[in-house]
Image (cartoon, rainbow, N blue to C red):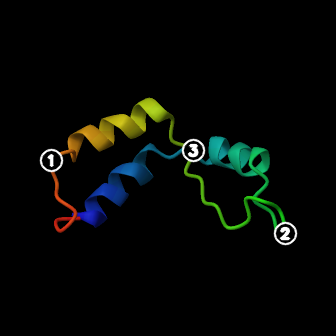
């Protein structure tokens, strides 16, 4: 199930927006956001995916 959730999120990703977010949140080496990963998915789209899988238990994920 986790693979399906990741697939759903990957399809919604926006590489250009992700690039801007990496810059804004300072994810470069030695910066405070180093290592953070952004997919560029707007919050309303994230909520749709969360709602789709809201009934899953942690064991199912």
**Label 1: how many Cα within 10 Å (few below 14, some 14–19, many 20+):** few
**Label 3: how many Cα within 10 Å (few below 14, some 14–19, many 20+):** some
Residue at the farthest top position: 44
Q: Secondary structure at mark 1?
A: loop
Q: Is residue 24 left or right of residue 18?
A: right
Q: Examine the image and state in which quarter residue 21 appears.
A: top right
Which one is closest to the eye, mark 3 or mark 2?
2
Q: Which of the numbered marks, if any, corresponds to residue 55?
A: 1
Q: Of marks 1 and 2, which one's residue comes earlier in the chain?
A: 2
Q: Secondary structure at mark 3?
A: loop
40 up-or-down from 32: above or below: above
Q: Are marks 1 and 2 in contact (CB under 8 Å)?
A: no
Q: Of marks 1 and 3, which one's residue comes earlier in the chain?
A: 3
Q: Which residue is mark 3?
A: 40
Q: Which residue is mark 2?
A: 30
> Quarter of the image containing the C terminus?
bottom left
Q: Is residue 51 left or right of residue 12?
A: left
Q: Position of residue 24 (x, y in %)?
A: 77, 44
The residue that appears at 67% across and 67% down in the rendered structure is 35
> Quarter of the image containing the N terminus?
bottom left
Which one is closest to the eye, mark 1 or mark 3?
1
Q: Nearer the viewer, residue 38 or 12?
A: 38
Q: CA distance from mark 3 to mark 2?
A: 22 Å
Q: Position of residue 5 (x, y in %)?
A: 30, 56
Residue at the farthest right position: 30
The residue that appears at 44% across and 43% down in the rendered structure is 12
Q: CA distance from mark 1 to mark 2?
A: 39 Å
Q: Position of residue 49 (x, y in %)?
A: 31, 42
39 up-or-down from 41: above or below: below
Q: Examine the image and state in which quarter residue 40 appears.
A: top right
The residue that appears at 36% across and 36% down in the rendered structure is 47
């Amino acid at each position: 199930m986790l693979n399906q959730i990741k697939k759903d999120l990957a399809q919604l990703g926006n590489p250009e927006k992700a690039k801007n977010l990496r810059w804004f949140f300072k994810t470069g080496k030695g910066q405070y956001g180093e290592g953070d990963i952004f997919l560029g998915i707007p919050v309303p789209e994230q909520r749709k995916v969360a709602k789709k899988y809201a009934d899953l238990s942690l064991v199912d994920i």
